[in-house]
């Protein structure tokens, strides 16, 4: 049964695959090594490039599909949810999964305009035959109105699923913003529940928490561990959670 197995989840804003503190240097190999060390079951990635000209700058002049690069390096199955066309390629969210899954992309509302945003969802078949849905997103960095509308759309969609739901990503808000309250109606803030709230941005000088795991309120979760990792491969810290379903 799923409740007999600990599940590990990782969420990471990867800064389009480039080391923010060493421009021109790829961070993908470092991230792949981190993934292999942690061995997460599911991973939410934000700021993911796919075949953009930008990736030429840190890949010896060759455009790269970053999801495919991480698939090859880790052996996990990847899915890319493009949010926008960018630099003659795509830019958006991604999920990596250790288990078979059906993937889908949801485009999120932008009532105030600005950059389009997406959510990736993996409907996962766990080894014991049970199911879980894992959603990954990156909310608007420009307008609070957009973040609030996006949080509402996400909550409306995911709260209707009849399986345990984990939501992860870079939400670009702190806990005093309306979008946080909107999500809190249907989801638990995992770090708050576990009692280990840590700043996630920036990785060099962490001052704010904008990266989260959310757990649906209809499932009985046991949080084994939850932490933000002290690595500087990106400008965000990766966050990792280990849970059981009760």
Image (spheres, helix red, strand yellow):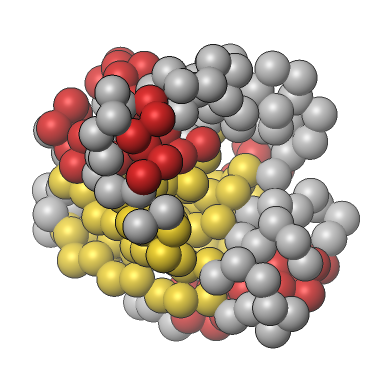
Residue plotted at (40% across, 30% down): 57
Q: Position of residue 30 (x, y in %)?
A: 36, 17
Q: Residue furthest front?
A: 61
Residue plotted at (53% across, 67% down): 117
Quadrant assignment, res 234: top right
Count of numbered labels shown in the rendering: 0
Residue 135 appears in the rendering:
no
Residue 143 vertical placement versus 244 (above, below): below
Residue plotted at (41% across, 75% down): 106
Quadrant assignment, res 119: bottom left
Q: Position of residue 9 (x, y in %)?
A: 39, 39
Residue 194 vertical placement versus 132 (above, below): above
Residue 95 vertical placement versus 8 (above, below): below
Residue 118 appears in the rendering:
yes
Residue plotted at (59% across, 80% down): 109
Q: Position of residue 81 (x, y in %)?
A: 35, 62
Taking depth in this image into account, of 112 and 246 the one nearest to the observer is 112
Taking depth in this image into account, of 82 and 63 the one nearest to the observer is 63
Instruction: Report whether 243 appears left or right of 130.
Output: right
Residue 161 vertical placement versus 5 (above, below): below
């Amino acid at each position: 049964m799923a409740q007999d197995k600990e599940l590990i989840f990782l969420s990471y804003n990867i800064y389009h695959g480039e080391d923010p503190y060493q421009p021109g240097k790829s961070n993908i190999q470092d991230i792949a090594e981190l993934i292999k060390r942690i061995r997460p079951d599911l991973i939410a990635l934000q700021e993911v490039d796919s075949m953009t000209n930008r990736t030429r700058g840190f890949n010896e002049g060759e455009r790269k599909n970053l999801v495919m690069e991480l698939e090859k390096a880790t052996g996990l199955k990847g899915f890319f949810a493009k949010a926008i066309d960018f630099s003659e390629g795509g830019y958006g969210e991604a999920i990596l999964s250790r288990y078979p899954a059906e993937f889908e992309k949801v485009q999120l509302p932008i009532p105030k305009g600005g950059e389009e945003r997406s959510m990736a969802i993996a409907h996962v078949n766990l080894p014991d035959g049970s199911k879980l849905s894992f959603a990954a997103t990156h909310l608007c960095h420009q307008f609070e109105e957009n973040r609030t509308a996006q949080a509402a759309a996400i909550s409306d969609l995911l709260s209707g699923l009849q399986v345990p739901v984990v939501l992860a990503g870079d939400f670009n808000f702190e806990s005093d913003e309306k979008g946080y309250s909107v999500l809190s109606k249907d989801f638990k803030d995992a770090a708050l529940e576990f009692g280990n709230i840590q700043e996630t941005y920036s990785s060099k000088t962490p001052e704010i928490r904008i990266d989260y795991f959310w757990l649906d309120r209809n499932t009985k979760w046991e949080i084994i561990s939850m932490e933000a990792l002290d690595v500087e491969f990106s400008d965000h810290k990766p966050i990792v959670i280990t849970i059981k379903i009760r």
